[in-house]
Amino acid sequence: MADIATLQQRLDEAEAAYHALMTGRREVTLAYQQGSGSRQVTYTMADRAALAGYIASLKSQLGIGRRRAIGVRF
C-alpha cells in the first residue's frame, strides 16, 4: 500500500479528472507509479462509474468514508 501523501495525491488527481469528465472533457488520463513500474489509465464518460469507484477506493484507503447518520432520540 502506498503512503498517505501518495494516496492523497492520487485522490486529488482522480477527483480533478472526474470533474473534468463531468464538465465536458471527452476523456481524461491518470498516470501513477505502482511498485517498480508505472501505470496509465484513460477514462471516458462511459467509464465514469469506474473512476468514481477508484475515488471511493482511494478514500477508503485513506480512511475517508461516508459518515453514518446519527439518530436523535427525544
Image: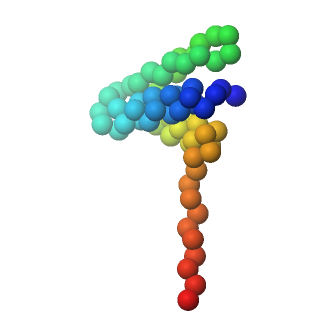
- Tell me the residue at 46%/32% (across/down): 12
- Tell me the residue at 55%/19% (across/down): 32
**Total numbered labels:** 0
Residue 7 visible in the displayed image: yes
Q: What quarter of the picture does the N terminus occupy?
A: top right
| Viewer-closest of 69 and 47 | 69
Examine the rendered structure and indicate whether residue 35 appears above or below residue 19.
above
Q: Residue furthest top?
A: 36
Identify the image quadrant of residue 38.
top right
Q: What quarter of the picture does the C terminus occupy?
A: bottom right
| Viewer-closest of 16 and 22 | 16
- Tell me the residue at 59%/16% (across/down): 33
Is 25 displayed left or right of 12 in the figure? left
- Tell me the residue at 61%/40% (across/down): 62
Residue 47 visible in the displayed image: no
Examine the rendered structure and indicate whether residue 16 appears above or below residue 40.
below
Residue 53 percent coordinates (x, y): 56, 40
Residue 21 percent coordinates (x, y): 37, 33
Q: Residue furthest bottom?
A: 74
State how the image is colored. Answer: rainbow
Identify the image quadrant of residue 27.
top left
Residue 8 percent coordinates (x, y): 53, 32
Identify the image quadrant of residue 5.
top right
Q: Residue furthest left?
A: 24
